[in-house]
Image: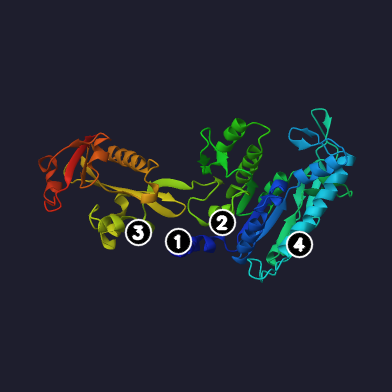
Amino acid sequence: MLDYVNWLRHSTPYINAHRDSTFVVMLPGDGLIHANFGNIVHDLVLLHSFGVRLVLVHGSRPQIDERLAARNLEPRYHRGLRITDTSTMDCVVDAVGSLRIAIEARLSMDMAASPMQGARLRVSSGNYVTARPIGVLDGVDLHHTGEVRRLDRKGIGRQLDERNIVLLSPLGYSPTGEVFNLACEDVAMRAAVDLGADKLILFGAEPGLMDEEGNLIRELSPQQVPAHVERLGPTNYQGELLDAAGQACRAGVKRAHVVSYAINGSLLTELFTRDGGGTMVDQEQFEQIREATIQDVGGLIDLITPLEEQGILVRRSREVLEREIEQFTIVERDGMIIACAALYPIDDSRAGELACLAVNPEYRHGGRGDELLERIEARARAKGLNTLFVLTTRTAHWFRERGFEPSGVERLPSARASLYNFQRNSKIFEKAL
């Protein structure tokens, strides 16, 4: 019970931040037939209840292939795009139409004792997407395969204003009445850009982007995306999702997320926890190291108070922190201060003191202490200091490993030596810069 209470408390800032935001959510055809699909629907209903404006884009690739197989037709692709001749287009229309109806029916459920009870959702779908044919590519005629030309932004916006969920299928229509088969990733990306969405969320089979060792990469800038797409190769679906995320962010969408349709709760974990559960592509730095401002005092207090209570750090009142805030450098992660350090130049000397180095326990294995130390040393050199002192009671080995040598009170400049607390009996180390 306590874990649930703590999770709900920690998720409150995200609930407030997401209210009235516009999210474009893309779910591929494989996700629609996965056993976890019901849970994803419940999570979408929860987002809607929190005031999120939802545009849902669905795929249909396996459903189309199933219909092709039933007619003894082979699926054909070029550069990852389906070649949609007339026979294939019949299968596309059949599959997409059936899926749209099934999704609308699922979102219309009102089951007692379930997350859907009392949801009263309204779903709007229609000819919101205008498309054009891709035509002949590398000498290959793609026939009825198209690309998004534009979206009916005003029409979609009116539906979202009415608290409706807008459902977009991977079909587009031309002014001459033609119908085109579209890639759902392209529809979702263009919808996010054209609508000015706050987030683009792309579901795939994997938790997110994995590195060469199989570890999840949690954050990327749009500029880092192309190298990973190239590493994954042209036929890797996770690379397609990542490419769509990168394009969206480069075109103005603030954040795009790649999450798994196979993991129960992956969407909520990504949106309502600080570290998320997938891969996020972010226009801005999700985590940054910077100099502190007066607005950071409250976050600093939250970070250092537990360490002060344990006797690891010297106690500092709010008044002291407000007065000395310009001495502090912080690491901020999605609005939360997770690490800090301070540099105090010592009067009448070319020495400074590194003080109040603290890292949130949940983030102590990511090299943030080293980043802060490097930043403090750079600040000290910029001020013309040539020696850095540190006084510590519990972390002597950490500083020794980073080039600090044992020292003593007699080595401290007089202005600092006169303030030494013999009762605290801190060990003194120094490092030449």
Per the image, the residue denoted by label 4 is 105
Per the image, the residue denoted by label 1 is 3
Say which amino acid is labelled 2.
Leu
Of marks 2 and 3, which one's residue comes earlier in the chain?
Answer: 2
Say which amino acid is labelled 1.
Asp
Image point 60% across, 53% down: which residue? Answer: 199
Of marks 4 and 1, which one's residue comes earlier in the chain?
Answer: 1
Q: Is residue 303 left or right of residue 8?
A: left
User: Which one is nearer the viewer's eye here, 152 or 372?
Assistant: 372
Quadrant in the rendering for residue 87: top right
Residues at discs 4 and 3 in contact (Cβ within 8 Å): no
Q: Is residue 433 left or right of residue 290?
A: left
User: Which one is nearer the viewer's eye here, 91 or 132?
Assistant: 91
Per the image, the residue denoted by label 3 is 302
Residue 123 visible: yes
Residue 282 visible: no
Of marks 4 and 3, which one's residue comes earlier in the chain?
Answer: 4
Per the image, the residue denoted by label 2 is 268
Residue 428 percent coordinates (x, y): 17, 42
